[in-house]
Amino acid sequence: MSEQRRIIHISSKHQITIPSQFFEALHFQDTVECICKDHELILRPIHKQSEREKSARLLESLIEQGLSGDTLLHAFMAESESD
């Protein structure tokens, strides 16, 4: 998306509304990362991972650590339960 600007009203409760074209273009869902840096406020969409995606990332991490077989299975089960 090329740079686009909008003036947004801030409510008395310090709330803003993200313009729909920005919301849709960035695929926002129900959570956002908010960063205050160098006198700027940055909002980034947080895309929730499915349980399958979380499991795949966890397995990938454990395999990268050199785990395999029963050790991999036990580590995966332990990590899965701690979430």
Image (cartoon, helix red, strand yellow):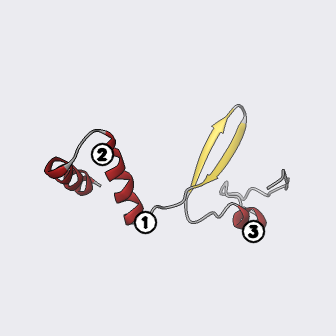
In the rendered image, which residue does mark 1 sit on?
A: 50
SS category of the residue bearing label 1: loop
Pick the front one: 68 or 22: 68
Q: Earlier in the sequence, mark 3 or mark 1?
A: 3
Residue visible at 78% across and 66% down? 21
In the rendered image, which residue does mark 2 sit on?
A: 63
SS category of the residue bearing label 3: helix
Amino acid at circle 3: Ser
Q: Spatial distance from mark 3 to mark 1, Cα to Cα?
A: 25 Å
Q: State the image quarter where residue 32 is shown.
A: bottom right
Q: Where is residue 34 drawn, in percent x and y?
A: 60, 47
SS category of the residue bearing label 2: helix
Q: State the image quarter where residue 42 is shown.
A: top right
Residue visible at 72% across and 38% down? 40
Side of 66 where 25 appears, left or right: right
Label 1 crowd bin: few (<14), some (14–19), many (20+), radius 10 Å? few
In the rendered image, which residue does mark 3 sit on?
A: 20
Side of 23 where 35 appears, left or right: left
Q: Which mark is residue 81?
A: none
Pick the front one: 14 or 34: 34
